[in-house]
Image (cartoon, rainbow, N blue to C red):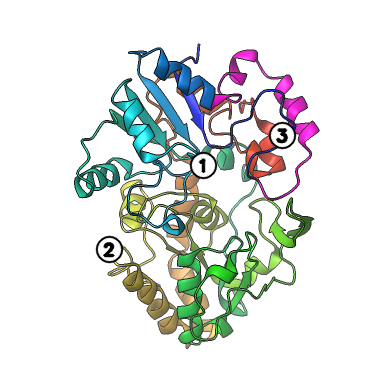
């Protein structure tokens, strides 16, 4: 039924007790027991996916093969620094993918909304003849947010806050380091509840900008965190799901850095959905085109608070400066003045909450993919250690 659907990134080898690539210890027995209860047809898009792809390739199938990714869209292109291009393709290279795509028809289903544009530009730059047939974007965790994670959570508009903004950072990435360095330089962190957990231990690889030290772990007092042993033996703080602590409600603005590891790949995660769902005015450091896409989907900008002129600028440094400038402009306001501003955008906050609750999800190109998506088989987050996702794989909201 799903013979031509291949899940790339995090797939299991049948019979293996190990989780590939995940740093935090997970109760593998619970996960495997859950998988054993699934419809056997679902297991064909969970186990041995590399072997499945090679089988389709060697048999030279002429049926469209759909490669489904949880994260990113393409392997590391030639000449691109691996630190700037995170990928779920593991050991499948750019050249190998193109070799396969020149033999069998391949389309890519990924959470990158500008994947086709990126691909064609890379092909032009590397003098590569395009071989991927089509790109289909989808929301890789919005349905789970709507169906389970935030389903019973209503918005709450916060007033009389002690801090201007909240900024929570778990995994260390270059763009997050750049933003925090700029906020430090602009003396804005004093106006924030903020955390820097260095969950993935990459702080040591990042530049030190102004006085911001990316190797120093900073946690919020009542952040919902757990301290787990990593597979490599290092103890690190790790967020427990995508929920927020009460300190989140003590700031007027949610500032987040969207997950994007493939240069300017536009991707939407809970970091964007969280603020709209909870009713928090927000800014995201995200690739150019992020805000335009949100407005196209019906979200309303908070023009009363923010100047968006340079928030979608192609240059990331310009986008970071725009965020810092917006915060600087608001940092001198009193609680009373901020409360008045928030009151003027109440209707927008409620509108955006309703928009994220009802945002259309039907982007899958086939009925089979749509079925897997609706039952939380694709994408699955089993391999990233979230107990909430493990609990609901194979489920559908009634």
Magenta highlight range: 22-49
Q: In this rendering, would 324 be left or right of 116?
A: right
- Assess whether mark 1 and mark 2 are in contact (beta carbons under 8 angstroms): no
Confirm whether the magenta stretch covers residue 35.
Answer: yes
Confirm whether the magenta stretch covers residue 171.
Answer: no
Mark 2 crowd level (few <14, some 14–19, many ≥20, 10 Å Cα): few
Q: In this rendering, would 27 be left or right of 155?
A: right
317 above or below 150?
below
User: Which residue has dot 2 on it?
Assistant: 314
For the residue labelled by badge 2, is the local secondary structure a helix, a strand or a loop?
Answer: loop
Task: Judge by depth and name the residue closer to the eye, 4 or 299.
Answer: 4
> Gap in Å between the C-alphas at discs 1 and 3?
17 Å
Q: Position of residue 279 (x, y in %)?
A: 54, 58
Q: Which mark is residue 391?
A: 3
Q: Position of residue 371 (x, y in %)?
A: 51, 21
| Residue 158 shows up from this direction | no
Task: Judge by depth and name the residue closer to the eye, 310 or 158.
Answer: 310
Q: Which mark is residue 249?
A: none
Quadrant housing residue 128: top left
Sequence-wise, the earlier of marks 2 and 1 is 1
Q: Which mark is residue 142?
A: 1
> Gap in Å between the C-alphas at discs 2 and 1?
26 Å
| Residue 375 shows up from this direction | yes
Mark 3 crowd level (few <14, some 14–19, many ≥20, 10 Å Cα): few
Indicate which label's residue lies in the foreground, 2 or 3. 2
Residue located 55% across and 81% down the image: 212
Q: Position of residue 153 (x, y in %)?
A: 64, 49
Q: In this rendering, would 200 be left or right of 288?
A: right
Sequence-wise, the earlier of marks 2 and 3 is 2
Residue located 66% across and 59% down the image: 244
Mark 1 crowd level (few <14, some 14–19, many ≥20, 10 Å Cα): many
- Assess whether mark 3 and mark 1 are in contact (beta carbons under 8 angstroms): no
């Amino acid at each position: 039924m799903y013979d031509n659907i291949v899940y790339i990134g995090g797939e299991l080898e049948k019979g293996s007790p190990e989780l590939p690539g995940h740093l935090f210890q997970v109760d593998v027995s619970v996960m495997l027991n859950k998988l054993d209860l699934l419809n056997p047809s679902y297991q064909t898009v969970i186990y041995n996916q590399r072997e499945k792809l090679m089988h389709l390739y060697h048999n030279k199938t002429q049926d469209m093969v759909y490669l489904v990714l949880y994260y990113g869209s393409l392997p590391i292109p030639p000449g691109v620094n691996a630190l700037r291009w995170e990928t779920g393709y593991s050991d499948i290279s750019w050249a190998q993918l193109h070799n396969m795509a020149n033999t069998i028809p391949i389309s890519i289903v990924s959470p990158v909304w500008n994947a086709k544009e990126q691909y064609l530009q890379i092909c032009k730059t590397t003098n590569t003849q395009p071989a991927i047939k089509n790109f289909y974007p989808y929301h890789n965790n919005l349905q789970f947010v709507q169906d389970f994670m935030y389903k019973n959570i209503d918005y709450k508009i916060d007033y009389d806050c002690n801090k201007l903004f909240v900024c929570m950072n778990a995994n260390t990435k270059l763009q997050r380091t750049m933003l925090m360095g700029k906020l430090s330089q602009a003396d804005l962190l004093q106006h924030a509840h903020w955390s820097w957990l260095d969950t993935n231990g990459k702080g040591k690889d990042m530049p030190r900008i102004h006085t911001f030290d990316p190797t120093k772990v900073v946690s919020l007092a009542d952040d919902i965190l757990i301290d787990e042993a990593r597979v490599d033996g290092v103890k690190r703080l790790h967020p427990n799901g995508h929920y927020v602590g009460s300190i989140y409600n003590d700031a007027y603005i949610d500032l987040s850095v969207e997950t994007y590891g493939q240069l300017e790949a536009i991707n939407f995660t809970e970091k964007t959905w969280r603020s709209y769902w909870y009713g928090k005015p927000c800014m995201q450091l995200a690739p150019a085109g992020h805000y335009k896409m949100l407005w196209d989907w019906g979200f309303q900008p908070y023009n009363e608070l923010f100047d968006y002129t340079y928030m979608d600028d192609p240059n990331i440094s310009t986008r970071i400066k725009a965020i810092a400038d917006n915060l600087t402009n608001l940092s001198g306001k009193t609680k009373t003045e901020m409360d008045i501003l928030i009151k003027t955008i109440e209707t927008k906050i409620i509108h955006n909450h309703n928009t994220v609750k009802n945002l259309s999800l039907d982007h899958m190109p086939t009925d089979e993919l749509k079925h897997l998506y609706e039952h939380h088989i694709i994408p699955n987050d089993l391999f990233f250690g979230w107990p909430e996702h493990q609990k609901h794989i194979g489920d559908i909201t009634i």
